[in-house]
Image (cartoon, helix red, strand yellow):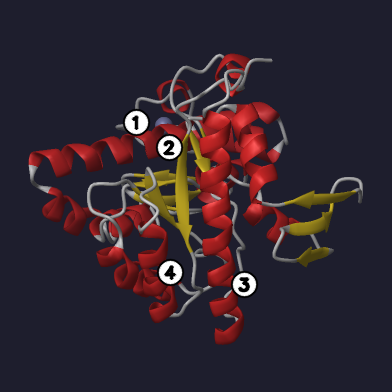
């Protein structure tokens, strides 16, 4: 169908993941070799093989703006020796990803010949392995670099410790991407540590369960106190839900399992995240990010008192 941009009628950037994380998080039956991973589909049990080349071919066919490297995403904590070997293999896989994507980008039939490759830093919760791995993948001079393998069950403080340790070793002047993160607070903290971009299911998934984010903190819409609350989620929000509907009504829809309730809540959270990141960029450009950070670092993670 001509690639994702055409298929979805979306002319802005699209990032595709490599499938690495998905193989490791969804599949019970998997076997890792130097070549790649053999696993059983979580949908129908079919045996599938995926290695760096297969992942790049799929992402090239999807024709996203940014393709992510195929890597092994390990659990935290994992034994030091295992993590070290896994990191070494991930570097070898990254070299294969780069070679394959360069080849695909040179083919006449390739849809997006300018597809970019981002490398992914791994190393579990070991600072020395993280730094060593970062140095090795930085040598490949890729378009951008991600920190992967975090937000997979470890404590938030543990995640911040690793970001702080590895960030100074990330190439200057290239985008830094923290994969799978996170709450508004996590995003603000990570930007403060030098991260540029993020992806997460949180705004949409939490919304579907009635958990909303606002500039005054978090709200659980299913709380009894909102049952007869005529106000919007957030008085200052311009999203379609806040402009037209009350907390009471959207709460009713969600409780009645009416899908419109979930849609309105998702619209609000996505609007909030877009606004949050826009305000962060404005604060950075305007030179007042530090005071913005100090003002919101606590508020955003607390319960909305209102
Ligand atoms: Zn709203």
Q: Marks 3 and 4, Cα distance to the nearest angstrom?
A: 17 Å
Q: Is residue 88 visible?
A: yes
Q: Marks 1 and 3, Cα distance to the nearest angstrom?
A: 38 Å
User: Which quadrant of the figure contains the N terminus?
Assistant: top right
Earlier along the polypeptide chain: callout 3 or callout 4?
3
**Disc sitting over residue 233 in the figure:** 2
Secondary structure beneath label 3: loop
Q: Is mark 2 within 8 Å of ligand 1?
A: yes
Q: Which residue: 62% across, 28% down?
A: 62
Residue positioned most to the left: 287
**Disc sitting over residue 237 in the figure:** 1
The mark closer to the camera, 2 or 1, is: 1
Secondary structure beneath label 1: loop
How would you rate the neighbour count of disc 1 (Cα within 10 Å): few for under 14, some for 14-19, many for 20 or more?
Answer: some
Q: Which residue is mark 4?
A: 133
Q: Which residue is mark 3?
A: 75
Count of all numbered marks drawn on residues in the image: 4
Earlier along the polypeptide chain: callout 2 or callout 3?
3
The mark closer to the camera, 4 or 1, is: 4
Q: Ligand 1: which quarter? A: top left
Q: Quadrant of residue 34?
A: bottom right
The x and y percentages for residue 40 are 86, 55
Q: Nearer the viewer, residue 209 or 162?
A: 162
Q: Nearer the viewer, residue 299 or 122?
A: 122
Secondary structure beneath label 2: loop
153 sits left or right of 130 in the view: right
Earlier along the polypeptide chain: callout 4 or callout 2?
4
Q: Marks 4 and 1, Cα distance to the nearest angstrom?
A: 42 Å
Secondary structure beneath label 4: helix
Q: Which residue: 80% across, 51% down?
A: 49
């Amino acid at each position: 169908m001509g690639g994702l941009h055409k298929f979805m009628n979306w002319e802005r950037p699209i990032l595709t993941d490599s499938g690495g994380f998905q193989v490791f998080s969804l599949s019970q039956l998997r076997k890792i070799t130097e070549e790649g991973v053999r696993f059983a589909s979580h949908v129908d049990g079919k045996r599938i093989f995926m290695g760096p080349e297969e992942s790049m071919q799929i992402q090239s066919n999807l024709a996203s703006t940014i393709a992510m490297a195929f890597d092994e995403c390990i659990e935290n904590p994992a034994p030091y020796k295992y993590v070290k070997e896994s990191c070494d293999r991930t570097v070898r896989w990254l070299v294969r990803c780069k070679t394959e994507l360069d080849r695909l980008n040179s083919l006449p039939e390739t849809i997006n010949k300018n597809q970019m490759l981002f490398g992914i830093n791994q190393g579990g919760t070991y600072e020395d392995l993280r730094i060593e791995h970062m140095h090795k993948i930085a040598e490949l001079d890729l378009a951008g670099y991600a920190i992967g393998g975090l937000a997979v069950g470890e404590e938030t403080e543990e995640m911040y410790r690793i970001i702080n340790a590895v960030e100074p070793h990330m190439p200057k002047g290239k985008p830094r991407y923290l994969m799978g993160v996170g709450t508004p607070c996590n995003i603000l903290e990570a930007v403060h540590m030098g991260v540029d971009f993020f992806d997460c299911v949180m705004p949409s998934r939490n919304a579907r369960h009635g958990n909303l984010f606002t500039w005054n903190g978090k709200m659980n819409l299913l709380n009894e106190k909102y049952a007869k609350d005529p106000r919007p989620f957030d008085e200052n929000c311009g999203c379609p839900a806040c402009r037209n509907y009350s907390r009471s009504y959207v709460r009713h829809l969600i409780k009645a399992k009416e899908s419109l309730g979930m849609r309105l809540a998702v619209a609000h959270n996505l609007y909030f995240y877009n606004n949050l990141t826009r305000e962060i960029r404005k604060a950075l450009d305007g030179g007042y990010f530090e005071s913005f950070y100090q003002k919101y670092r606590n508020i955003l993670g607390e319960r909305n008192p209102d």
